[in-house]
Image: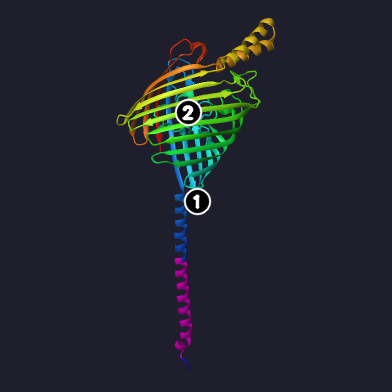
Amino acid sequence: MTHSPFRLLPVAVALAASFATQAADEQKLAELEKKVALLEAKEQNSIADKFSFNGFASLNMQLGNQNHAFMKSENKVRFDEGSLFGLQGEFEVNESTSAVVQMVARGNKKENWSPDVEWAFLSHKVTPNLTVRGGKLRLPLFMYSDYLEVGYAQVGVRVPNEVYGSVVLTSLTGGDFIYDMELDDSTLSFQGFAGSQKLSASKHSYNADTQFDDIAGGVVNWTDDTWTLRAVYAQSVISSSTNWNENNQSVLNSTFDDDKAKFYGVGGRYENGNLMLVSEVTRTTVEGFYYDVDAAYLTAAYRLDDVTPYVTVSHMETQDDDERNATADRQLANLLQNPNSVSARYAYGSAKALADKLNTQRTTYSIGARWDFLPNIALKGDISYLTGFGSTYGGVASEYKNDENILYTLKVDAVF
């Protein structure tokens, strides 16, 4: 008779084998889970490596010597106008394609820190020299167009309003191409762009939606890192169905009816490490009631270690004042013939308002300094003197036309 220990031995062996198999399976499972975790971590790191973020911010303090309203200033300290916060993200889709989004929140009264998408496009490098992009893009009319909101990239507290304020549109939805041609010691670049864009009432000081269609143009840029020369041409067709609103009252005959607009600009920059000279000259023409304007500026700056003093002279002058004045004169004659007519009074008031607002001649002298007191942070101070209004109001409140108009600005710009 077999003793019970020998009868139980096969069972024990089977159980031991089962336990060994289970332990081996658990070990394999643990190793597999470890590999999966490593792969997931690697994948997460790989995705994280494809993202890049940066930001910029400006805290602007400005004070007018009176309520002349230049740059929305008042005779009291204001922090909202000119202050902003922006974020830009880029995702590398593959080695030649990326997606870019830039959002900006501005502190001015109309936007009140409401975030707005300034850029949202796909970029694809077709060849090492050719890049095509599609989406919402910056309208490249000026030398500082790509850095309009990035105050840290500008030597002064703001770009010259006489030039940069002549065009209200800053972006387009469409596409462009950029072709870089490498020369011996310099680069020649060509950029072509096309698209359309709706300018919402919240972006317009006269509270009217405006549509820009058939936007098209090109830029030629040459640089050898010391000298930069630039030329640009752009055109568009403008339409709107809502009259401007001035002081809560509609201004007659202030809509666009497929009016053609054209923009011409040339610019140059010299920078040798210490001395910097920048200048742009522009002409904007628009059919209909809106102004045709010539504008220019010259900035000279000299870097002294962390401090960069600068001076800027900028000028603008509308070229079609006679047309608006003639319209106002006709409406005045009609009012004199019909002094009790409400419609005649309204028509004259609207024509006079357009002439007063759009007829502009102004020269601004600015002196200031930039102090890079911390990495990626600059403190700037500026005094701007407005003069040379001619027979116009110069873009300031009418009651201050003949007074001295000064704007004081203190600003902190940062990038991160």
- Name the outermost residue toward the bottom: 1
Which image quarter: residue 171? top right
Colour scheme employed for the rendering of this structure: rainbow
**Residue lying at 44% horizontally and 53% vertically, measured from the top left:** 45
Kindly report the secondary structure that dominates the magenta region of the rendered protein. Answer: helix
> Disc count in the image?
2
Q: Position of residue 257 (x, y in %)?
A: 66, 25
Q: Which mark is residue 266?
A: 2
Q: Is residue 16 magenta?
A: yes
Q: Check disc 1 and report the residue beneath it.
A: 94
Q: Is residue 148 visible?
A: no
Q: Which residues are magenta?
A: 3-31
SS state under label 2 = strand
Give amino acid for label 2: Val
Is residue 22 in view from this perspective? yes
**Mark 1 falls on what kind of element?**
loop
Question: Residue at position x 47%, y 28% from top?
Answer: 266
Q: Amino acid at mark 1?
A: Asn
- Do labels 2 and 1 touch, CB within 8 Å? no
Report the side of 130 relative to 335 (left or right): left
Quadrant of the snapshot with the C terminus = top left
